Each structure stands twice: as C-alpha cells, then as structure tokens.
Amino acid sequence: MTAGVYETTKKDGTPSYRASFTHKGKHISLGSFPTKEGAHRAYLTAELLLRSPEGALLSLSDYAAAGKPLSYEKWVILLNLRDNGIYFKTPIYLYRRYFVYHYNEEIHLKFDADDLFYYSNHKIMKRGGHLFVADYGMQVTLTSRYGIKAYAVEGRDYCFINGDSTDFRYGNLEIYNRYTGVTSLHKNGKTVYLAKIHVNGDYIIGRYSTEEEAAIAYNKAADLLNRLGIAKNYSRNYVEGITEQEAADIYKKIRISPKLKLAVK
C-alpha cells in the first residue's frame, strides 16, 4: 500500500485515488487524483511542506515551479497551517491585521480580520463575472456584505479607494449610493440626491437634500405605482439612522413627481 493513498471507485466504475495526510492529530484530505502516482506525490508534498526544513523555503508563489502537485487551494491551506498554525478549510492565508483569500492563482482577495470567521466557513465562487458565497441557500455577492446592492456599478455607486478591486477591507470601500433608486449628484460644492424608479423607462421621482429623503421618496413612489396597478415587486428601502416615526413623518410630507401617474397610461 502506498503511504497516504487510498483507492476508490467512481460511479462509472473507473478507479480513483484519494490522498490524505495527518498533521498533529488533524486528518487532512488532499483531494482525488486519476493515478496512484499523482496521489502519492500530493502526500509527499504535504509531508515536505509540514515536516521538512526544506518545505519552509517554499512560498505561495512557488506553486507552479513545484509542478502543481496538489490543488492550489490545498497548497494555500497547507502553507497557512505551516506558517500560522491554523487549519482552515478554505484557501486563506493570514497576515497580521488582515487575510488573503486565494480564489485561484490569479485572484487574491484581501479582507479585514473581522471577516475571518465568515470566509473560513464560506467558499467563494464565481458566476457571470460576480464573486459570491452560498449563504442559507442564496447567492450572496461579496459587495452586498457592505450594503452595496447587487446591481450597483463600481465608480458610480461605490469605489475601491486604492483602486484595487480585490481589496475588500472596510477602509478601502467607499459607498456613494446606499439605497435603491437613489443617486448622488455633486455640483458647485453641493450634493443633492436624485430618486428614480423604473416603469417602462426611468421616471424621475424628485431631487432631495438628504439621502434618506430620497430613499423614502422612492418607497412612496413604489407604493403609488403598485396602487395604480403596476404589478412589479419593487424592493423597498430600509432607511438606517432614523426611527420608524421619523421615517413615517418624512413619508407623509415628502413630495414626489405627479408625472409618475403617466407611467400607468
């Protein structure tokens, strides 16, 4: 029997070889391989990285030069275990005040230490150009954890302050527009908030002096359109920082464009 290698059979009857490794009482699966030799090589790599002085000379950037003996994800996991003494089931490498999630060899995502528990238990995936995690059966985009809407546009609704779109540390994200249908406009040193809603085209609800007023105006417009027979499930804004009574008072007083009624004709 080859050390660390176990033969299994796929559903179609073809053989497959699983490699695993035990380090300080922790059993670590290294993955499945089409050949016994490949599985054994993965086992020897784990032994090199975790038990051999020569393994300490290898770094994250040495993966390709080492011949890619196991998945890149496992390479990151083992190096973090070696250097930081902590095993994560996701490809995280710890630094002093932040960590990097190595999605693949090219995409390395930075996060604050506050997010470590979340991303050590949630695998990042990609679909349609968007990075997301599966959370309670739903696809949750990475930006949505910061209050950024799924349809938000970088540069218009938010930005990465240092220009690095892989740096998700909280201090590097600036949100311009937090609410559905609300866009901030800057002119002559002043900021106003434009509220728009889509009904067979964009309709301007109005311009408002605060972001909260614009968000509530959007809710009021959505309610009006639904009452007038527009069968669309508009997402309502939850406005932070004010009480329910304050929100209700703004809702009652806020003016919205009378042209909205034309949308139903």
Image (cartoon, grey):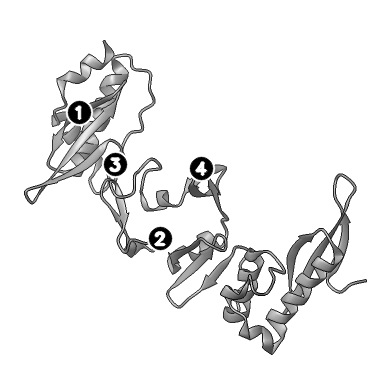
Q: CA distance from mark 4 to mark 3?
A: 24 Å
Mark positioned earlier in the residue sequence (2 or 1): 2
The tag on residue 78 is none
The mark found on residue 204 in the picture is 1
**Residue type at mark 1?**
Ile
Left or right of 34: which side holds 212? left
Crowding at dot 1, Cα within 10 Å, few <14 / some 14-19 / many 20+, comes out as some
Q: Nearer the viewer, mark 4 or mark 3?
A: 4
Residue identifier under label 3: 179
Mark 2 packing: few (<14 Cα in 10 Å), some, or many (20+)?
some
Taking the spot 23% from the left edge, 44% from the top edge, the residue there is 243
Q: Which residue is mark 4?
A: 128
Q: Earlier in the sequence, mark 3 or mark 2?
A: 2
Q: CA distance from mark 1 to mark 4?
A: 30 Å
At horizontal 76% and vertical 75% (from top left) the residue drawn is 22
Amino acid bearing label 4: Gly
